Image (cartoon, helix red, strand yellow):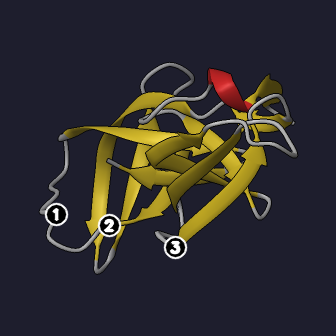
Amino acid sequence: MAREQKQVRELQEGSYVMMDSSPCKINAYSTAKPGKHGSAKARIEGKGVFDDKKRSLSQPVDAKVWVPIVERKGGQVVSVSGDDAQIMDLDTYETFTMRIPEGEDLSPDDEIEYLEYEGQRKIV
């Protein structure tokens, strides 16, 4: 699996973290001061990279969490049919089919960027 462990205090907005066993991009990160009966706590709010669901996580700042290694890659559109596009990876020349996001207008020979994590892909 392409992931690593980090302490919660090392996270920041814009980075990735695993929440409910799916990779999420951190939208908000806040900490509460240590109190009389415990350590400082961090509250993390994020949005799923591949499913767009909002999730939150509350942990002590010295706890360890999994951080996914989401790769940003380049590809070229080979063909478009309906809501799907056939993409060729520019590094490995592998071809695969991806769903076109709403509002995107792709045509053959367009170069795109996409995110990949454990076989899941999303056009950005």
Counting from the top left corner in percent of width and height, residue 57 is at 68, 58
Q: Quadrant of residue 39?
A: top right
Of the residues shown, which amino acid type is indicated by label 1? Glu
Q: At which x and y percent is residue 100? A: 32, 66
From the viewer's perspective, is 51 left or right of 40? left
Identify the residue shown where x is 43% and y is 35%. Answer: 13
Answer above or below: position of 72 versus 97: above
Q: Which mark is residue 55?
A: none
Question: Which marked residue is nearer to the observer: mark 3 or mark 1?
Answer: 3
Residue marked by disc 1 = 104
What residue is rendered at 46% in x and 61% in y?
98
- The single residue placed furthest to the front in the displayed view is 36
Evaluate whether residue 66 shows in this view: yes
Tell me if residue 83 comes above or below residue 90 in the rendering. Answer: below
Residue 30 shown left or right of residue 55 in the figure? left
Q: Cβ–Cβ below 8 Å for labels 1 and 2?
A: yes
Q: Nearer the viewer, residue 6 or 1?
A: 6
What amino acid is at disc 2? Ile
Relative side of 114 to 69, left or right: left
Q: Earlier in the sequence, mark 3 or mark 2?
A: 3
Secondary element at tag 1 = loop
Task: Locate residue 64 relative to residue 83 in the image: left or right.
Answer: right
Answer whether residue 48 is visible to the viewer in this image.
no
Question: CA gap, disc 1 to disc 2?
Answer: 7 Å
Frontmost residue, 95 versus 116: 116
Q: CA distance from mark 3 to mark 2?
A: 18 Å
Residue in view at x 52 percent, y 73 percent = 53
Q: Secondary structure at mark 3?
A: loop
Residue 53 has which mark?
Answer: 3
Q: Quadrant of the N terminus?
A: top right
Residue on which the image places disc 2: 100
User: In the rendered image, which quarter is residue 99 located in?
Assistant: bottom left
